[in-house]
Image (spheres, rainbow, N blue to C red):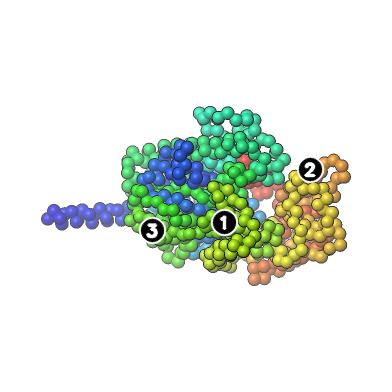
Amino acid sequence: MVRRLLAACLLLARVVHAESPPSVVFVLLDTTRADRIGAWGRSDTETPVLDGLALRGAVFLRHHANSHATRSSMPQLLSGRYYHPNVLGPFKTHEHPREFAFNRRDPTAVLLPGVLRGRGYATVGVSAHAWVVAGCELGRQFDSLELVPFSAAEGHGDGAQVIDRGIALWEARDRTRPLFLYLHLMDMHMPRPVPEGVTPPEHDDGRFNVGGEPLFDRERRRWSRSDARDFTAADRAHFAWLYDQRVRYADWQLGRLLAVMEREDPELEHTLVVITADHGEELAEDGRTDHTQSLADSVQHVPWILAGGPVRPGERTSRITEHVDVLPTLLSVLAVPTPPGVRFDGRRQMTPDGRLCRACGRSTALYAWEEYRGARAGRHLLREERPGSPRAHCLGQRLLYRMVDGRQTLVPPSRGAEALARALARKASSALDGPERAFEATRYEHASGSILLRPEFWHLDDADVRCVPVDLDTPRGFLREPGWLWTERGIIHGAGERDGALTVRVSLPDGDYDVDAAAVVAPPPPWLFGYGRWLRKSFLEEMPGTFVSLGRARAEQGWLRVDLPAAAARGRHVIGLRATPPGMSPRAFGKDGEPGESEQVKRLRALGYVQ
Ligand SMILES: [Zn+2]
């Protein structure tokens, strides 16, 4: 009798459990490196909340983002798919192929909040990031996604604001339904002021501004914001110290939310907590800060912790996992079936009973984006530029790096290096070729207006182009050589006889286009004074001031081919091709951009995304 009662109780418990899946609190720590967190072996840090969650749950010790920045990483993290188009708020919607307004939605892909919403979850979010907002593809998947208020100078919201709102939403939740609460914290991202109440250690005062930006050699940072080759050891120490204070601050803020959650659910039996980051940050170790275009471990090795709900404590793995694994793993742990017709590129890393799947991790992490591919395994990183791109032409299509203690060094060519690079390239190819082809074949609707295709997305095929990265150190005579010249920001034609046109291919939806070279006027350099100013005016300007018509051209089978005559690029720095469907008025792409964009642009400037 007792036995039968017990069995009935167990059955009932199971039914109740099946009817009320755990709530999910998903914390996205923007710009957070795994190696600055105690749970990843760092002893001189203070991240008790994250470390505590790691002890109570599963830790993926070698987890990698699939790309270098918020815009490139978030779509892959939240869809479980390589090569997913933009899901965030509008930013230069005409300039990056993933941001084109006429990109097509992929019916075989889903985003995490949408899946849970479809399963009866209340879906709410609080964001400190100007791109993670209600009106974007991601935001539309939520019942509500709030952006906390912040000024343009601040660049992003503060963790305290996000957590305060998060706590309020948590306490006000409908207890008859599971909740998906998404919190996007920006405390580790530039600008990074010293948190209140923290006293900085002795350092060379006046080297950094209140947001943590270097104040010395501004000219260098004007050309490349991430250039930190001139940092002293003391500068590097201060820069890293400040970053650690911000991690500590975010950890403390998270603790406030956790304390509230534990009041009702001390063991987190009914709540699954997910911690991860979209990407990390270089802290000047390799002469670079920031995360732009970087595949360094400091940028790609990010935290991933799952705690609470059915996840068993003490689970940890050193096998490589990737962002594309996160969504299938969460669905597995939450016992949510993959929606019909949907496919993931990632693998489930946990079983529904909350244990790690030992055989599911990988030996290689893959990086997938418009401009590059990467494969990271053992001590090596292979970076492949897009074939035919100016970067591939100038830097080499494949670069192999050796990674030691978080630093990367280029491996000089040798037979062994070549074999290793080939092996890594094969791994990348076997996993990424299919998804990339599928993505490219279905990515566009018909073009709905002018597009500006930046030279980094051009295919130059076998063009004869010299490579002179133009910056503050470029010598005066660099334009005297004849022929085509890649400046790293655009293309210009030097004086001289080699006057053949440059054939450029770009990927666009089929159809006719009126094409212009979008350029900045670059008059001959001054003989005596003002060379630096001339360099900046001619080669740093990102918005075109002049357009040279190249006539009408037709894109067929996804490609538009244009001949850029030398005359169009003589005395002009060509920074894009403008393609406009016939009958539509071409856009000027002025500084003011789209209506209502100015506040957004100011915020993005504080984040370093707009010059
Ligand atoms: Zn980010």
Comparing labels 2 and 1, the label whose residue is closer to the camera: 1
Q: Is residue 489 visible?
A: yes
Q: Against 427, is 286 above or below?
A: above
Tag 1: amino acid: Leu
* Residue holding disc 2: 532
The x, y position of residue 371, in whole percent, is 62, 58
Task: Give the residue drawn at x 37%, y 38%.
Answer: 260
* Residue holding disc 1: 381
The x, y position of residue 14, in whole percent, is 27, 55
Cα distance, mark 1 to mark 3?
A: 26 Å
The x, y position of residue 320, in whole percent, is 47, 56
Q: Are marks 2 and 3 in contact (CB under 8 Å)?
A: no
Is residue 201 left or right of 361 when viewed as pictured? right
- N-term-proximal mark, 1 vs 3: 3
Cα distance, mark 2 to mark 1?
A: 36 Å
- N-term-proximal mark, 2 vs 3: 3
Seen as rendered, the residue at the extreme left is: 1
Q: Is residue 79 visible?
A: no
Comparing labels 1 and 3, the label whose residue is closer to the camera: 1
Place residue 232 in its image quadrant: top right
Q: Are marks 1 and 3 in contact (CB under 8 Å)?
A: no
Mark number, residue 42: none
Seen as rendered, the residue at the extreme front is: 415
Q: Residues within 10 Å of mark 3 (few under 14, many from 20)?
A: some
Count of numbered marks: 3
- N-term-proximal mark, 2 vs 1: 1
Which structural element holds mark 3? Answer: loop
Q: Residues within 10 Å of mark 1 (few under 14, many from 20)?
A: many
Tag 3: amino acid: Cys
* Residue holding disc 3: 357
Is residue 321 left or right of 386 when viewed as pictured? left
Q: Residues within 10 Å of mark 2 (few under 14, many from 20)?
A: some
